[in-house]
Amino acid sequence: MKLAVFSAKSYDREYFQSVQRSLYPSYQIEYHSFALSEETVPLASDCQAVCVFVNDVLDAKVLSALRAYGVGAVLLRCAGFDNVDLQKAEELGLFVARVPAYSPESVAEFAVALIQALNRKTHRAYTRVREGNFSLDGFTGFTLHGKTVGIVGIGKIGMALAKILKGFGCHLLAYDPFPNEEFEQYGRLVPLDELLAQSHIVSLHCPLSKATKYIINDQSLAKIKKGALLINTSRGGLVDTKAAITALKSKQLGGLALDVYEAESYLFYTDHSSEIIQDDDLMRLLTLPNAIMCGHQAFLTEEALTQIAEITFRNLEDYAQQRKCDNSLVQGRDILVSGDTQPVRI
């Protein structure tokens, strides 16, 4: 079995190699630092599986090319799958599996870090002190204790955040079309409009879909509690960036912290420090004192990287052994005949 890993950074390689050496030494792996796309798909021509991340392109053209080259499995080392044409994958008989959860506490803890940085201005204080300026002007924040936090999406990450914020003494509200009874011991489930109107802080933890695309837009921002903080560590497409900038400028939105960005696929995970970035919305955000932007790093902990590698290899092993995979989005219609190097269609 040969696997091509795309968008592989140094930390991906380190943790994948560690898991492979100890548990799956028979697999051959090729690492590519760039994303899978229509231009790079030929590099998978001698592989039976590919492993991809959030910004790799898996549209109908790329999936068809993978299938034509004999690839039978697509392994997502992430929870989100909005970048995959699942209907086309099923039509082609491809096996598609993801990592549905990996250290949800890692993302939840980073969301809290962003809340605190945005509220207490620690990022600005760090820069000011390095310049010898110890003035505290403009750094007044508020205590989290007693404040209302709205969590949009109460899956594993949303629940991890709820448990942390309950410890801070926050009042919790949540919106989710699929109620989670566990949350009821931490707070109340309410309609989205009520959550927006009552929350001092709103944190997004839902997948990106047609229903959630731009869930934060001009209309929803008009309903948000004036001066509230908005945190997004989920998917960039949940927030209409132009609408958020307008709300920040009018002070309807008190602050914005993003670890994800709707146009991140062309920018994130790569050094652009010597270039002129052509994204005017991103550049405008970076000039605002009440906005924080990170590069999609909420998942980046030792625990999460280990779990991602382990679960990805287990998914691949399920495919190789022709077993049902609990993490599959499309189970596929391929078998691997013993001794063959290519999948055989059944």
Image (cartoon, helix red, strand yellow):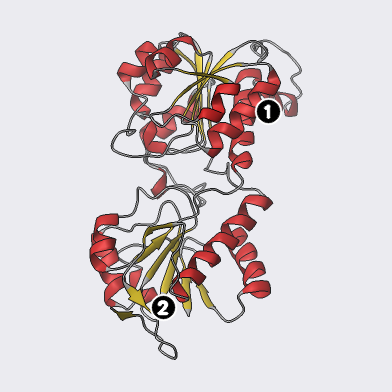
Up/down of 128 relative to 314, above or below:
above
Residue 345 position, x and y percent, is 28, 79
Residue 285 position, x and y percent, is 45, 28
Up/down of 258 relative to 3, above or below:
above
Q: Disc 2 marks which amino acid?
A: Cys
Q: Residue at x 46, y 31 (%)?
A: 153
Residue 9 visible in the shown view: no
Residue 332 position, x and y percent, is 33, 67
Mark nearest the camera among 2 and 1 is 2
Q: Residue at x 33, y 30 (%)?
A: 214
Q: Quadrant of residue 47?
A: bottom left
> Which of marks 1 and 2 precedes in the sequence?
2
In this image, 10 relative to 261: left or right? right
Q: Residue at x 64, y 62 (%)?
A: 15
Of 19 and 323, nearer the camera is 323
Mark carried by residue 127: 1
In this image, 140 relative to 336: left or right? right
CA distance separating discs 2 and 1: 48 Å
Q: Residue at x 44, y 17 (%)?
A: 190
Disc 1 element: helix
Disc 2 element: loop
Quadrant into which the C terminus falls? bottom left
Q: Disc 1 marks which amino acid?
A: Thr
Single out the residue that lies furthest toward the bottom: 339
Of 103 and 264, nearer the camera is 103
Residue 229 position, x and y percent, is 52, 18
Local packing at callout 2 (Cα closer than 10 Å; few below 14, some 14-19, many 20+) is: many
Single out the residue that lies furthest toward the front: 181
Q: Quadrant of residue 143?
A: top right
Local packing at callout 1 (Cα closer than 10 Å; few below 14, some 14-19, many 20+) is: few
Up/down of 127 relative to 173, above or below:
below
Residue identifier under label 2: 47
